[in-house]
Amino acid sequence: MTNKRNRFYTATVAALAVAALAVAPASAASPFSDVKEDHAHYEGITTLYAAGIVNGYPGGTFKPDTKVTRGQAAKMIAGALQLDTKNVTNPNFSDVPASNPYYGSIAALAELKVISGYDDDTFRPNQTITHGNLAKILGSIPTLPELESTQGYAEDASVTRGQLATFIAEALTKSGIETPEVPETPETPTEDGFTLSVLHVNDTHSHAENFPKLATAVKEQREAKENVLTLHAGDALTGTLYFNEFQGKADLAMINEIGFDAMVFGNHEFDLGSSPEGLQALADFVKGAKFPFVGANVDFSADDKFTGLFTDLVSSEPENGKIYNGIVKEINGEKVGIFGLTTEETKDISSPEKVTFSNYIDEAKKAVTAFEGMGVNKIIALTHIGYNDNPNVDNDILLAKNVPGIDVIVGAHDHKKLDEPFVVDTNTVGEEKDATLIVQANEYVKYLGTLDVTFDDNGIVTEYEGELIDLGEVAEEEALVKLLAPYKEKVDAANNKEIGVTLTEELANPRASEDSLESVRSNETALGNIITDGMLAKAQQYTDKTVVMALQNGGGIRAAIPAGNVTVGQVITVLPFGNTLALMDVTGAELKAAFEHSVRNAPQENGGFLHIAGAKLQYDSSKEAGARVVSIEYFDKTTNQYVAIEDGKTYTVATNAYTAGGGDGFEMFGKAYEEGRVTELGLSDWENFQEQLQSLKEVKTTTEGRIVDIAQQQ
């Protein structure tokens, strides 16, 4: 076979025309519904179709204006050259394993030195190819005739399917080899297998104001594509005034109007569990949904509010407003299985109360087995466990490696912006496996994720293309604007009410980035100091005991406040979870254990990182986790001095009810709660924060050295 490829190459690759496949310009009607005769690339597309080089999509479309990836370009060029893509030599690109759908084409072209990779030994098959990239590839063919069609494009502009077809067709035509006529009535083109288009969002967090743009994007995708599935990967609730005011009703109205096929529960769906009404708002959300929910590792059976809404079965006839382990959707005659997973961390980072969570890998294996038993071989995991989150708990990459049979994972939780699908094609011991695609669409309805994935008859992924649509560039759907209007009116009124405080500088809420580790989840911040100062002052009003310090988890501080007049809406957005103030009686040893837990990941981020008032903490992040705390001191008002915390003494501490209940893994606080050493005061955290801002003559935007990592001082 090698000799055959070399013969083709030396004879005609230089002209990019082999095996007598060059064709005359097409004259018959286009077989593609979206390629009319007046289309700029009509001739090139129809020419290549007649030569058998390209096919269309299900439904008879070609999608000529879709951007081409490097992998897709390799496939089209290899097809034009009629190269053997089966018996090939490994191209040794680290991101092109044998399971990659473009592996054969890339390998064949690399062997002939028509293409090469990047300096880091990658080929980047899913990266959009530019005209500059394509020029380098075509330029590697020594005697390729100059192509007029390639001229006039900017080097950094993306190449479309139509443009590439025109370039290749021109080269074939210029080869001068006689070829068959274009069929006058070509058959409607189809691709092998079944192509599914998945639209997905996640971590929308009550940003209802962005749903009108999402509605437009979803509508456009549904009009352009066949076999569309629309999924929400959880954390629809909490985060803005829309939730504080309506507890999910505004979000549900938007989601129902757009139309989703399924949703998985995020951890923040359970945030109201500790309220007097418990999870009633979530139960109402489920009942009102015009779609089913999936949760293979979530058990609602102990909470009476969900009686009649929950079953631990996989259903082929799911009902709207009900919860299942998994569901089967029949799309154009093909069965697709969808099951859900919610992070087990929910018990520590939210308030699920009687709702329990089981191991994600165990439940995923059960779900896949159930689907396969029903004859379903196209399986989607709709997850809220994080793309590459804490490996000691759960994440999507480990799910893909541990559970065979999952084709697509639509993920959430860590707000990851995956610009293209991430492919997992090896198991836990490095052995090759069928590809699993992982997608996630960032947060706050900023993007609509799209994934077009083709399956063969055995349910194996053979081709895929995915991208994020920037909703900031999309027009609003008028129907959704009108639907949102009554909710928005009330939110705007609350949002815009000024509290009588003016900031000369922003109260920042930093998060770690590639350039800086500075974060509300790993460093003292002025915002955290003001919040805890307010907690300490308010708590002292409700007890005769001395409250020695106040604690606020960094993960609960969600936004900055810009310079200018502060509004109620801005205050609530900083502390959006509806937490209340609590008092705890804990020992010095428990406090030390809590601070060890707080700084265990430093300088990396940790939602349980504690901001403090009334005390000072010194720790050393260079030491082993669990042995980092150097000193904890509280300010003794009787002596006007800082005094060291003693292990054997009991101290009264203020914090929010979530942390006092053991949230973020503070088991020592959870123990105190169970033993009756916690008193919930029922005072709103954002109102306490607002009162503290209003009490200040000057709002400081600098830190005070309350929390010091001595490793960073050396």
Image (spheres, rainbow, N blue to C red):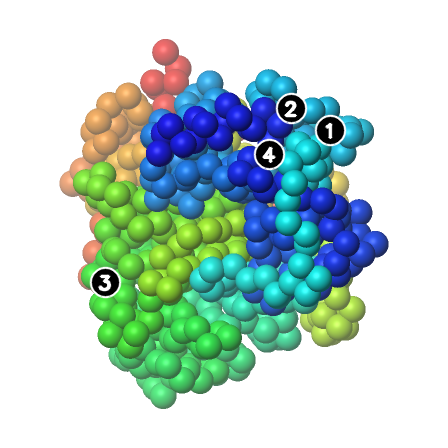
Give the quarter of the figure containing the C terminus. top left
Q: Secondary structure at mark 2?
A: loop
Residue shown at 64% from the left, 56% from the top? 62
Q: Secondary structure at mark 3?
A: helix
As shown in the figure, which amino acid type bears the numbered disc 4? Ala
In the rendered structure, which disc, 3 or 2, sits on the residue that comes first in sequence?
2
As shown in the figure, which amino acid type bears the numbered disc 1? Leu
As shown in the figure, which amino acid type bears the numbered disc 3? Lys
Q: Which residue is mark 4?
A: 17
- Count of numbered marks: 4
Q: Secondary structure at mark 4?
A: loop
In the displayed image of the protein, which residue is found farthest to the right? 38
**Which is closer to the viewer, label 2 or label 4?**
4
- Residue 596: name its quadrant: top left
In the rendered structure, which disc, 4 or 3, sits on the residue that comes first in sequence?
4
Q: Which residue is mark 1?
A: 147
Q: CA distance from mark 1 to mark 2?
A: 8 Å
* Mark 4 neighbour density, 10 Å: few (under 14) some (14–19) many (20 or more): many
Q: CA distance from mark 2 to mark 4?
A: 10 Å
Name above or below for residue 433 compared with residue 335.
above
In-front residue for pair 577/587: 577
In-front residue for pair 281/402: 402
Residue shown at 40% from the left, 55% from the top? 461
Q: CA distance from mark 4 to mark 3?
A: 49 Å
In the rendered structure, which disc, 1 or 4, sits on the residue that comes first in sequence?
4
> What numbered label is drawn on residue 144?
2
As shown in the figure, which amino acid type bears the numbered disc 2? Leu
Left or right of 464? Residue 501 is right
Q: Which residue is mark 3?
A: 365
